[in-house]
């Protein structure tokens, strides 16, 4: 009965939930940025600890392990720095979040290209969201407003859009994987004949 829960890509959903919380904090509590940066730092540190736990739980020490542990270390350290330097960390926080958002948006853009390749319905949704996230994060990092309240609102909206892309990405990933397996199967079947 609960087999579909095991098939979900929980990583994307956890990231989406964290981005939603941080995005809403930046959006609605932009007047108290010190509290928001401390909360963001704590959330980012906890996410880094979670990634480290997931990395060390896997017995294999392969490339995935190295990427997970590197990401965990980066998240944990940047979260601690953000929480400690709360009022001075706004520019650092904006730059770090925008960098991660551009990278994440690039992965989603790659996913949209794969979805288009396999003729999946609504591939354009993930494309539009990815392009919007990448451009918004890039322009926020490049042209950070002097008024941190405006930057906080912009960052909150960008994170909420990125959260939406992480909520819908697992369905596209699953459909692309099924289409890729079918393609491999048909190619192998054609080669047998």
Image (cartoon, rainbow, N blue to C red):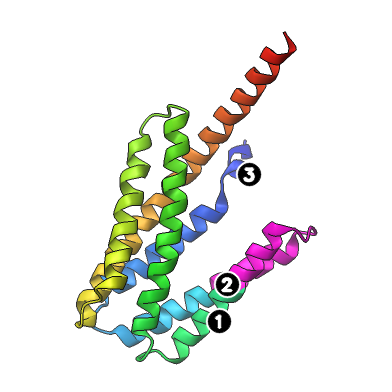
Q: Which residue is mark 1?
A: 77
Stretch of the chain drawn in magenta: 46-72
**Rendered view: 164 above or below 67:** above
Image marks 2 and 3: residues in contact by CB distance under 8 Å: no
Mark 2, Cα crowd under 10 Å, few <14 / some 14-19 / many 20+, is many
- Check whether the beta carbons of the residues at disc 3 and disc 1 lie within 8 A of each other: no
Quarter containing the N terminus: top right
Does label 3 or label 1 sit earlier along the sequence? 3
Query: Dot 2: what SS?
Result: helix
Q: Nearer the viewer, mark 2 or mark 3?
A: 2
Residue 52 located within the stretch drawn in magenta: yes
The residue pinned by badge 2 equals: 48
Determine whether the residue tagged by mark 3 lies in a helix, strand or loop: helix
Percent position of residue 133, x then y: 33, 57
**Front: mark 1 or 2:** 1
The answer for how far apart the CA atoms under marks 3 and 1 are is 31 Å
Cα distance in 3D space between marks 2 and 3: 23 Å
Q: Is residue 172 left or right of residue 138?
A: right
**Comparing labels 3 and 1, the label whose residue is closer to the camera:** 1
| Residue on which disc 3 sits | 6
Q: Secondary structure at mark 1?
A: helix
Q: Nearer the viewer, residue 28 or 146?
A: 146
- Side of 188 relative to 169 (left or right): right
Is residue 69 visible from the viewing direction of this image?
Answer: yes
| Residue drawn at point x = 79 percent, y = 57 percent | 60
Q: How many numbered dots are placed on residues in this image? A: 3
Q: Main secondary structure of the magenta part?
A: helix
Q: Can residue 50 be seen from the camera position used here?
A: no
Quadrant into which the C terminus falls: top right
């Amino acid at each position: 009965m609960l087999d579909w829960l095991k098939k979900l890509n929980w990583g994307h959903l956890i990231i989406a939930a964290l981005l939603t919380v941080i995005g809403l904090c930046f959006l609605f509590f932009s007047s108290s940025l010190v509290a928001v940066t401390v909360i963001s730092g704590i959330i980012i540190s906890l996410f880094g600890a979670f990634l480290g736990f997931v990395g060390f739980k896997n017995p294999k020490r392969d490339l995935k392990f190295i990427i997970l542990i590197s990401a965990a270390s980066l998240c944990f350290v940047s979260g601690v720095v953000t929480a400690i330097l709360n009022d001075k960390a706004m520019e650092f926080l904006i730059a770090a979040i925008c960098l991660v958002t551009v990278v994440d948006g690039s992965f989603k853009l790659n996913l949209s290209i794969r979805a288009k390749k396999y003729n999946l319905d609504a591939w354009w949704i993930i494309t539009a969201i990815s392009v919007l996230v990448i451009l918004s994060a890039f322009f926020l990092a490049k042209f950070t407003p002097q008024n941190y309240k405006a930057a906080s609102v912009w960052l909150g909206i960008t994170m909420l859009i990125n959260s939406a892309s992480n909520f819908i990405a697992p369905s596209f990933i699953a459909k692309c994987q099924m289409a890729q397996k079918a393609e491999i199967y048909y190619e192998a079947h054609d080669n047998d004949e």
